[in-house]
Image (cartoon, rainbow, N blue to C red):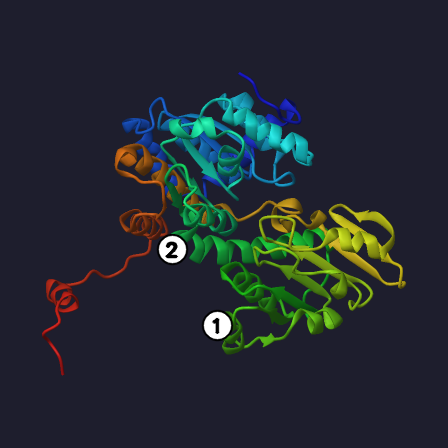
C-alpha cells in the first residue's frame, strides 16, 4: 500500500483520538453498522479530499465498512492531523496522502496520487479534487459516477461549472443540506473558530472589539459565540439582506474601512478574495489580530501585508508578527488559512456526525442512482436530510410530535379557510 504521511509512529495517539471522536458520532456509527451488513459501496473506488481530522477518519472507516476502496488526501495544507493520518494507514490500511504544513507542490501531488487510482466517486471539501479532474485529468471523468461537496466554497465552484455547461459528472451539494449548514457551519464554525483564535493567542475575549467579515451561516456562528464570551461584535457585509439581518440580531454593521480602525480581532468568513487589503492594514491599530475561517487563504491579502512590513517573525505557534513600516504591529493567525483547523482541531465531533452522515449516505445515493443522474449539482435528497435529523434526535434521547391524519390532510388541502 502506498501512502505519504509524516510519521507512522504517531498512529497509536491518532487511533485513541479517533475512538474518542466516534463516541460523539452515534449517527455515523449507526450508518457504519448498516454498511457493514449491506456493503452498498462494494468494490467502489472512492477518493476523498477532506480535512484529515479524527471525524474525517471515522467517515473513512464507515465508507470502508460499506465495501469502498477508499483513499484520502488533505483539502488544506495546514488542516491535517498527522497522528490521524498515521492511524488510518497503520491501523486500518487506508492509503492517506497528507502531511500538516505540506507545500503547494506536495499538496497537488497528493491530489494526483488519488486521481491515479481512477476514482468512481469523489468526496471534496473545497472542490480541489473535482477541479483537478476538470482542468488536468479530464480523461478520468467518464469513469466517475458522481461526487459530493462538503463546503460553501466548493459548492460555489461546482455551480459555476454547472452554469457554464462544463460540469462533467453529477455532484451532490452536501453543504446545502439543512443538517449540514444549519449546524456544522453555524455551531461548528462558531465554536471552532473561537477555539483556534484562543489557542493561538490566549487573548481575553471579554471587552474586545471583534469584527466578523461575512454574515453567512459561518459568520453568524462566530458572531454569536464571540458575543457570548463578552466581545463587542461588529459585522461587515456586502449583501443588504444579511447586513439588515445582522442589525436586527443586535450587531453594529459598518464598512471594513471603519471596522479596521477599531478592531482588536478581525475574522473573515466570506468565501471571497481580497476582503482585507493593504488599505485596511494601514488603518489598523497596533496589535490588531487577523484570522480567516473561510476555506481558501485568499480572503486576507497577505502579499500586501508583506509589502507594508519591514520585519516578520513567528512570535507564537500559528502567530506571525508583521512589523509595519509605520511602526505598528499586526498579528496574522495560521498563515491566513482556516484558523479553526490550522490552530485548533476543527469542529466538534458531535456536529460533524451529521455532516459526515450526509456524506456517507450521499455516496450510497450516487452509487445506487448513477444511471439516472445528470451532469448537474443536486441537493441532498430531503429524505436523507430528514433521516439524519431524525437519527440525531434519537441518539440524543429527544422525542418530537407526529402529525395526526387530520393535521396532514389540513396541510395538504386548500379548501379550508376562515
Mark 2 crowd level (few <14, some 14–19, many ≥20, 10 Å Cα) = some
Quick check: 298 left or right of 279? left
Residue 20 seen = no
**Distance of mark 2 from mark 1, alpha carbons?**
20 Å
Nearest to viewer (mark 2 / mark 1) = 1
Residue at the location (54% across, 65% down)?
A: 215
Going from N to C along the chain, the mark reached first, 2 or 1, is: 2
Q: Position of residue 341 (x, y in %)?
A: 61, 46
Q: Among all residues in the image, which is located at the extreme bottom?
A: 418
Quick check: 122 left or right of 208? left
Residue at the location (45% across, 27% down)?
A: 140
The numbered dot on residue 335 is: none
Rendered image quadrant of residue 254: bottom right
Rendered image quadrant of residue 198: bottom right
Residue 210 to residue 377: above or below? below
Mark 1 crowd level (few <14, some 14–19, many ≥20, 10 Å Cα) = few
Residue at the location (29% across, 39% down)?
A: 373
Mark 2 falls on what kind of element?
A: helix
Residue under pointer 2: 178
Residue 309 seen = yes
Q: Position of residue 101 (x, y in %)?
A: 69, 36
Task: Classify the position of the C terminus by image quarter.
Answer: bottom left
Q: Position of residue 31 (x, y in %)?
A: 34, 37
Quick check: 264 left or right of 411? right
Residue 129 to residue 403: above or below? above
Q: Among all residues in the image, which is located at the extreme top?
A: 1
The numbered dot on residue 241 is: 1
Mark 1 falls on what kind of element?
A: helix
Amino acid at each position: 500500500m502506498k501512502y505519504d504521511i509524516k510519521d507512522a509512529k504517531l498512529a497509536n495517539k491518532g487511533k485513541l483520538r479517533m475512538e474518542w471522536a466516534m463516541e460523539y458520532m452515534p449517527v455515523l456509527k449507526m450508518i457504519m453498522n448498516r454498511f457493514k451488513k449491506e456493503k452498498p459501496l462494494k468494490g467502489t473506488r472512492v477518493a476523498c479530499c477532506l480535512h484529515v481530522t479524527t471525524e474525517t477518519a471515522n467517515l473513512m472507516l464507515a465508507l470502508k465498512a460499506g465495501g469502498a476502496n477508499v483513499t484520502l488526501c488533505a483539502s488544506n495544507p495546514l488542516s491535517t492531523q498527522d497522528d490521524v493520518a498515521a492511524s488510518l494507514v497503520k491501523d486500518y490500511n487506508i492509503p492517506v496522502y497528507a502531511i500538516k504544513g505540506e507545500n503547494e507542490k506536495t499538496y497537488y501531488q497528493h491530489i494526483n496520487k488519488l486521481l491515479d487510482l481512477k476514482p468512481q466517486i469523489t468526496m471534496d471539501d473545497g472542490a480541489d479534487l473535482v477541479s483537478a479532474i476538470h482542468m488536468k485529468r479530464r480523461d478520468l471523468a467518464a469513469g466517475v459516477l458522481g461526487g459530493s461537496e462538503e463546503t460553501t466554497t466548493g459548492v460555489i465552484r461546482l455551480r459555476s461549472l454547472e452554469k457554464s455547461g462544463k460540469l462533467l459528472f453529477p455532484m451532490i451539494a452536501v453543504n446545502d443540506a439543512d443538517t449540514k449548514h444549519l449546524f456544522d457551519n453555524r455551531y461548528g464554525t462558531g465554536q471552532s473558530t473561537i477555539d483556534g483564535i484562543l489557542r493561538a493567542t490566549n487573548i481575553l475575549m471579554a471587552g474586545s472589539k471583534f469584527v466578523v467579515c461575512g454574515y453567512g451561516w459561518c459568520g453568524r456562528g462566530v458572531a454569536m459565540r464571540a458575543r457570548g464570551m463578552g466581545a463587542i461584535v461588529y459585522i461587515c457585509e456586502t449583501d443588504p439582506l444579511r447586513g439588515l439581518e445582522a442589525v436586527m440580531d443586535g450587531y453594529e454593521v459598518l464598512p471594513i474601512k471603519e471596522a479596521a480602525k477599531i478592531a482588536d480581532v478581525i475574522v473573515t468568513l466570506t468565501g471571497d478574495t481580497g476582503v482585507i487589503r493593504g488599505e485596511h492594514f494601514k488603518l489598523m491599530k497596533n496589535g490588531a489580530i487577523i484570522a480567516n475561517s473561510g476555506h481558501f487563504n485568499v480572503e486576507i491579502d497577505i502579499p500586501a501585508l508583506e509589502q507594508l512590513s519591514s520585519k516578520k517573525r513567528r512570535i507564537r505557534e500559528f502567530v506571525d508578527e508583521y512589523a509595519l513600516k509605520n511602526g505598528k504591529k499586526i498579528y496574522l493567525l495560521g498563515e491566513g488559512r482556516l484558523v479553526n483547523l490550522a490552530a485548533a482541531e476543527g469542529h466538534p465531533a458531535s456536529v460533524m456526525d451529521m455532516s459526515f452522515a450526509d456524506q456517507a449516505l450521499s455516496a450510497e445515493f450516487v452509487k445506487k442512482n448513477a444511471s439516472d443522474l445528470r451532469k448537474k449539482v443536486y441537493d441532498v435528497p430531503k429524505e436523507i436530510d430528514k433521516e439524519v435529523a431524525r437519527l440525531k434526535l434519537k441518539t440524543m434521547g429527544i422525542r418530537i410530535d407526529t402529525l395526526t391524519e387530520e393535521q396532514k390532510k389540513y396541510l395538504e388541502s386548500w379548501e379550508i379557510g376562515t
